[in-house]
Image: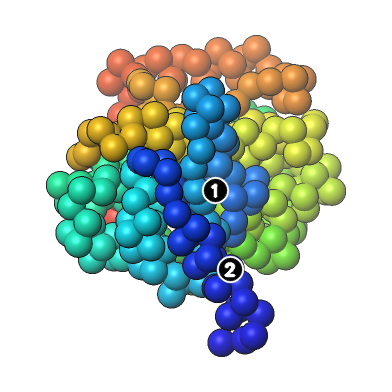
Amino acid sequence: MTLMKKILGATATLAITAGAALADPAIIFDLGGKFDKSFNQAAHEGAERWAKETGGSYKDVELQSEAQREQALRRFAEAGYNPVVMTGFAFASSLEKVAPDYPDTKFAIIDMVVDQPNVRSVVFKEHEGSYLVGIMGAMASKTGTLGFIGGMDIPLIRKFACGYVQGAKAANPDARVIQNMTGTTPAAWNDPVKGAELAKAQMAQGADVIYAAAGGTGVGVLQAVADAGKLAIGVDSNQNYMHPGHILTSMVKRVDNAVYDAFNAGPDMETGLVVMGLANGGIDYAMDEYNKDLVTPEMLEAVEGAKAKIIAGEIKVHDYMSDNSCPVE
């Protein structure tokens, strides 16, 4: 371990052990940090919204290494924070160990299911939102070739990709979708240089609309696409503002609501499985002043029609995680 990592680790520990007021909530951000402009930042915005609306205070920490996961969970629980929220599937194994040791502490994990009596597991129907942005992407594409760039190659990100392909092919059965994952380790979430390289390679193959589901890596994707004068699709947070005129839409995953709801419930937070999708406002696509000139009335009509049919059960978007397969590629 380098000296800098030791210093950062010590800083994180000190931040956690500063002490909690009675039943203050806490949140642990995954690698990439709370200002990744994507998943972690959405979680941060939910925590900040809760603090501003209630006048309450909370503690947070940004992990610097994989080794800090279990340590952070234990220190927050020991310090009396309740509930303790964590962003990302990678906390699951640590939470499995820690939750039974602190039965009076409520934990909430986003993007994974941990079956413990004091844990709330929040998962999203990302495939539904990805289907919608796939429709928009295919309708906006001039070449008929779209791109998808994921972060870490895991079933969850394959779920985004599969939904996207299904939506694209619903709008244009002849559409081609080039898919690349950034890597197989957590570093894949925070590599904007690699994201830009992958985007350039896909554009060289004809892709003119690229969907990035890659955390901080996606920042590089969006930049490269904008620089080339093509269209990108953002993810998790509304990223339309980052490159006005070049981000067709964003597949919004309301991680902010998941954090806000957990903080708002406090120590009385109900545990168990929470599923957030189109029907309950947990997933959507973004429309605002930054992309209104890119989205035609025909696109809006198509995507709103599909959204209504998904909610009604008339369109069933295949969930890759149900069997680790995708009916269309």
Residue lying at the far left of the rendered structure? 117
User: Residue 52's image quarter?
Assistant: top right
Residue 51 placement, left or right of 229:
left
Looking at the image, which residue is at 54% across and 60% down? 15
Asked whether, in this view, residue 99 is left or right of residue 239, the answer is: left
Q: Nearer the viewer, residue 118 or 109?
A: 118
Which quadrant of the view contains residue 307? top left
Image quadrant where one finds the N terminus? bottom right
Q: What amino acid type is highlighted by mark number 1?
A: Asn
Left or right of 120 on screen, residue 117:
left
Q: Earlier in the sequence, mark 2 or mark 1?
A: 2
Question: How far is disc 2 from disc 1 in space, using C-alphas?
Answer: 20 Å
Q: Are marks 2 and 1 in contact (CB under 8 Å)?
A: no
Is residue 6 visible to us here?
yes
Element class at badge 1: helix
The residue beneath circle 1 is 40
Residue 123 at what x, y percent from top left?
Answer: 33, 41
Q: Residue at image x 64%, y 58%? A: 217
| Residue 37 rendering spot, x and y as whole percentages | 65, 45
Instruction: Point out the frontmost of discs 2 and 1.
Output: 2
Mark 2 sits on what residue? Answer: 11
Badge 1: residue crowd in 10 Å (few <14, some 14–19, many ≥20): many
**Residue for point 26% across, 63% down:** 98
Q: Nearer the viewer, residue 252 or 134?
A: 252
**Helix, strand or loop under label 2:** helix
Q: Which mark is residue 166?
A: none
Determine the residue positioned at 67% across, 37% down.
Answer: 239
Q: Nearer the viewer, residue 158 or 98?
A: 98
Give the amino acid type for the residue marked by disc 2 in the picture.
Answer: Thr
* Residue 294 higher or lower than 116, as above or below: above
